[in-house]
Image: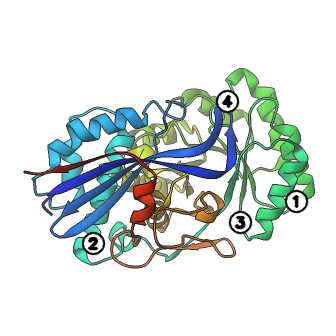
């Protein structure tokens, strides 16, 4: 597959609601969008990095620079037989997995289209619909939280995840557990706690959570292992799993019993497949995380989540929860807790170009010549 041209854009898409986590509030997404062209086909990739380095250290500006000045010039005009070969071309550049993932995932889309197959088949998926849950941000009150949980359970979502932080944890989770004793309930701390918060975290064992996600430092494994030995609630690792090598070390340390996969955090689908293989061999359940993706990123995540070790509901809920209008033509909507995987070659979605044009803040077209 010869890569002939690329188009980079920065988009700004408003959220339908205020989304609060332990590290801030979001009301819009700034999206780095890549269109990659080769042999008459188009591959799409979406960046999930944020304007500020809150989730991980990468930002929209840093990723744009690397893609525009380093990564795309490295690959345009060259022929790559498969995505692994493209990843090897980027391997000399350290870190920056989210920026690399934009390009790598766009190439996977292009590669699958060249084969005339849906991406899930090329990746080795085993299902055509994905079980999904919902992630609820911090609400103004406990009563508001209960209403939100009730509404989403009535819509068929198969897992409720609540964002928590010190001072907004046990009481709200206890209220939800009492009101909905049969619900699959989890909590996501986004690294808001320290090991000294052990008594607060230990208390959550009373509530029979399916897991607590990333309670400690964003790059920590050792303290998570110490905490996991002392609490009954399974720890799910998210931010600290940035590669298959980190996943291997987490397994050796027994730092968590569940893994959250975000292909963008791992550098793309290739590294995600390596983590999947490790987790599958060890019996560690996976689920697909979310970064408030628009349609391109959501479609990529759905295709990857069809692999067999993804046994827990993921954060790939209906696009209409987040956007008045998505950037793709296809409606990515869940029914009774199941999200169908888009059909057709590649990721199976097509850009809604009039909308993309309206919300574009910056763009650049680059060609091999």
Q: Residues within 10 Å of mark 4 (few under 14, many from 20)?
A: some
Up-down: is 7 above or below 361? below
Q: Is 317 rendered above or below residue 248?
A: below
Against 336, residue 367 (above or below) is above
Answer with mark 1 or mark 2, whichever residue precedes in sequence.
2
Task: Residue 230: tell me if it is visible.
Answer: yes
Tag 4 or tag 1, which sits nearer the N-term? Answer: 1
Q: Position of residue 257 (x, y in %)?
A: 61, 47
- Is 240 situated left or right of 364 in this image? right
- Name the mark nearer the viewer: 1 or 2: 2
Residue designated by label 2: 113
In space, the residues marked 3 and 4 are separated at their CA atoms by 25 Å
User: Label 4: which residue?
Assistant: 192
Q: Quadrant of residue 55?
A: top right
Asked where in the image residue 352 lies, by quadrant, the reply is bottom left
Task: Please name whichever residue, 266 or 258, is drawn nearer the observer in this view of the structure.
Answer: 266
Mark 1 or mark 3, earlier in chain: 3
Q: Position of residue 248 (x, y in %)?
A: 43, 42
- The residue where tag 3 is placed is 158
Secondary structure of the residue carrying tag 3 is: loop
Give 292 or 313, whichever is nearer the viewer: 292
Work out whether residue 276 can be spotted: no
Callout 4: SS: loop
């Amino acid at each position: 597959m010869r890569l002939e041209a690329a188009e980079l854009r920065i988009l700004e898409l408003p959220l339908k609601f205020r989304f609060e986590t332990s590290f801030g509030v979001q009301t819009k997404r700034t999206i780095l969008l890549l269109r990659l062209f080769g042999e008459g086909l188009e591959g799409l990739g979406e960046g999930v990095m944020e304007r500020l380095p809150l989730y991980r250290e990468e930002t929209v500006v840093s990723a744009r620079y690397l893609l525009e000045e380093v990564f795309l010039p490295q690959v345009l005009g060259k022929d790559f037989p498969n995505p692994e070969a493209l990843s090897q071309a980027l391997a000399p550049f350290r870190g920056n997995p989210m920026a690399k993932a934009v390009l790598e995932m766009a190439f996977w889309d292009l590669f699958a289209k060249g084969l005339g197959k849906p991406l899930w088949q090329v990746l080795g998926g085993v299902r055509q619909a994905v079980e999904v849950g919902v992630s609820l941000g911090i609400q103004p009150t406990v009563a508001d939280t209960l209403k939100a949980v009730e509404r989403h359970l009535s819509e068929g979502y198969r897992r409720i995840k609540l964002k928590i932080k010190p001072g907004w944890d046990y009481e709200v989770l206890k209220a939800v557990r009492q009101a909905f004793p049969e619900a699959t309930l989890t909590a996501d701390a986004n690294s808001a706690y320290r090991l000294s918060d052990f008594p607060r975290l230990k208390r959550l064992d009373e509530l029979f959570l399916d897991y607590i996600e990333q309670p400690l430092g964003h790059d920590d494994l050792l303290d998570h292992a110490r905490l996991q030995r002392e609490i009954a609630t399974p720890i799910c690792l998210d931010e600290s799993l940035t590669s298959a090598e980190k996943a291997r070390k987490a397994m050796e340390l027994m730092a968590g019993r569940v893994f959250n996969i975000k292909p963008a955090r791992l550098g793309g689908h290739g590294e995600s497949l390596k983590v999947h293989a490790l987790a599958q061999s060890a019996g560690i359940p996976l689920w697909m995380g979310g970064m408030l993706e628009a349609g391109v990123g959501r479609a990529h995540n759905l295709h990857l989540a069809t692999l067999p070790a993804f046994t827990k509901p993921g954060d790939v809920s209906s696009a209409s929860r987040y956007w008045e209008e998505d950037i793709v033509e296809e409606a990515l909507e869940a029914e009774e807790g199941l999200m169908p995987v888009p059909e057709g070659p590649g990721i199976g979605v097509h850009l809604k170009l009039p909308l993309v044009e309206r919300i574009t803040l910056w763009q650049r077209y680059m060609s091999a010549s």
